[in-house]
Image (cartoon, rainbow, N blue to C red):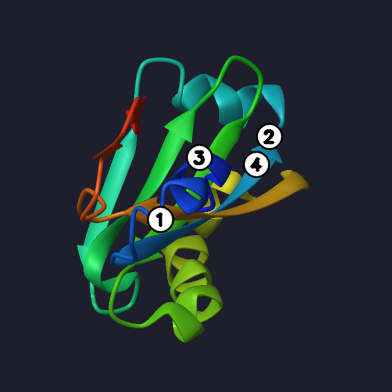
Amino acid sequence: GVHSKVANAIKAGNYEYAIAFQERIRLPDEKMEYYRDLAEMYVGDDVSPDFYGWVFPKCDHVAVGTGTNRAKSDIKKYQMGVRARVEPKIRGGQVFKVEAHPIPEHPRPVRVRGRVALV
């Protein structure tokens, strides 16, 4: 991962990463039914200047999120853009978990050092 102890131990080097932000939302049953066989992806400057927004159904909730590489400090603004687009479909839902994760854009410069391989 981005903060890998192994990568640090072998001095694998730095690299660019994007940030992904999502909220896990438990929806009322009738709203969840809409997403039974459907995932949604959104593009546009309101959801991200260089990534996309999403609604991914899980077994008993949806994950609503976005990401960016260029405007990491604005990630919450873009999340509000995704939420605004899907608001009627998630109305009445309860956020129960908020997640943010770095996503590597490229491999690290060093992936093998001695007998250690970063995979």
Q: In this view, does 69 lie above or below 60?
A: below
Where residue 30 appears, x then y in whole percent?
A: 62, 25
**SS state under label 2:** loop
Q: Is residue 33 left or right of residue 66?
A: right
Q: Distance between the residues labelled 1 and 4?
A: 35 Å
Quick one: label 2 or label 1, which is nearer the N terminus?
A: 1
**Where residue 11 sits: x, y (%)?**
40, 55
- Dot 2: few (<14), some (14–19), or many (≥20) neighbours within 10 Å? some
Identify the residue shown where x is 21% and y is 62%: 43
Mark 4 lies on a secondary structure that is strand
| Residue 44: mark | none
Which sits earlier in the primary sequence, circle 3 or circle 4? Answer: 3
Mark 3 vs mark 4, foreground winner is 3
In space, the residues marked 3 and 4 are separated at their CA atoms by 30 Å
Per the image, the residue denoted by label 2 is 27
CA distance separating discs 4 and 2: 10 Å
Q: Which circle, 1 or 4, is nearer the viewer? A: 1
Q: Mark 4 points at which residue?
A: 24
Residue type at the position of mark 2:
Leu
| Distance between mark 2 and mark 1 Cα atoms | 44 Å
Q: Mark 3 highlights which residue? A: 6
